Image (cartoon, helix red, strand yellow):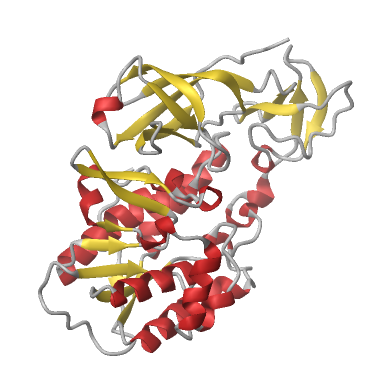
Amino acid sequence: MGVSEHNSVHLFPPTFEPWAGEPSDRQVAVLMSGGVDSSVTALLLKQAGWQVLGITMKIPVADQCRHPRACCGADAALVCGRLGLAHYFLDVADAFEAAVRGPFEQAYLAGETPSPCVDCNTRLKFGVVWDYLERTFGLRHLATGHYARVVHCAGRPALARAGDRQRDQSYFLYGVPVGRLPHLLLPMGDRDKAAVRALARDAGLDVSEKPDSMELCFAGEGDYRQALAQRRGAPPGPILNRAGEAIGQHEGIINYTLGQRKGVRVTAGEPLYVTRVNPQDNSLTVGTRAEASRSRVVAGPVNVLMPERWRPGERLRGKIRSHGEPAPCRVADASEAAAIVEFETPQFAPAAGQHLVLYDDDDHLVGGGTIRDDSEPTVTS
């Protein structure tokens, strides 16, 4: 979904002094949430001689949110004040609704499992917001506190996994336009969290011990269902076995995702998992873990960062969800619009709406795309 920046974002007056950076190729906007990672990102770039502008996006948050992180923008402003940086709030509520929250709700209602963090990075941060900052302030460079790296490969920049594999967030960044990579700065890429917190403490930043963000920002970091406008209208329906026979009742399909076991209250001789969400007849289909697993995964639309590796026959490593290690796979088909990948070992519950992200053996991100519901289960004995 494309989102126009015109009339979709609004810049508030400067929190402190207005931006007065001298024209230079060493100017950068840092997207600051108020957490320790983005705060240290701004700190490190300033120490490295960059002219740093702090930008905090204001997004809509669930009305019922009472989470203490809901007002993180104030922390970002205070960090900029301590570091002597210009800071602005950028109201992106309309763009966020069009690019992230709206598609998130529609995907769940369609029986898919969306990944709004990927959409926010791809469509909003690396699209509408970056374009706006370049046009308004003349800034070509953007920095975030994500744990990933921009490295040089064959004479050009490439996106790579973070040095700390446990915190790697490259999966969420695969949608960055390839032309933006030379101007994307990711200072967290070679650091671990303990070192980042130590840097914040040494600089006297009050966010040094702030807890990590773990859930959806627009749900107030509570249950994702709080962000679904139609959550209270989800009616119960039948739970079906693979033969299409009703064997139980669910509590509303919006409460289930592919591969889910919790909430499937059906007595059986072995654990049952959701293998399909059927919004057309308001039913869930359940099966064994093997029945929920697939070797073939289809994805599209796609974003390709290393075109020379995006071709049939390539041996790569793929992830179908953000956590875990990439698994060996072969590209069966690839184009500018879609890809078909065959994993050596069946992957558990590749869900439509999630993302297939492919890496080479050196941890460079080759490309990725949105998983489609287009494959038959791989049942193993």
Query: For this rendering, which residue is in front, 62 or 356?
Result: 356
Is 290 rendered above or below residue 284? Answer: above
Image coordinates of residue 44 in percent, x first then y, are 35, 72
Image coordinates of residue 85 in percent, x first then y, are 30, 83
**Screen quadrant of the C terminus:** top right
Query: Can residue 11 be seen by looking at this rendering?
Result: no
Q: Residue at x 31, y 89 (%)?
A: 16
Q: Residue at x 45, y 70 (%)?
A: 33
Image quarter of residue 184: bottom left
Instruction: Specify whether 270 is left or right of 47.
Output: right
Query: For this rendering, which residue is in front, 194 or 2?
Result: 194
Query: For this rendering, which residue is in front, 73 or 264?
Result: 73
Is 195 rendered above or below residue 71? Answer: above
Q: Residue at x 29, y 48 (%)?
A: 151
Image coordinates of residue 202 in percent, x first then y, are 48, 82
Instruction: Specify whether 331 is left or right of 165.
Output: left
Instruction: Specify whether 174 is left or right of 200.
Output: left
Is 201 rendered above or below residue 245? Answer: below
Query: Can residue 240 be seen by looking at this rendering?
Result: yes
Q: Residue at x 22, y 56 (%)?
A: 183
Image coordinates of residue 161 in percent, x first then y, are 42, 45
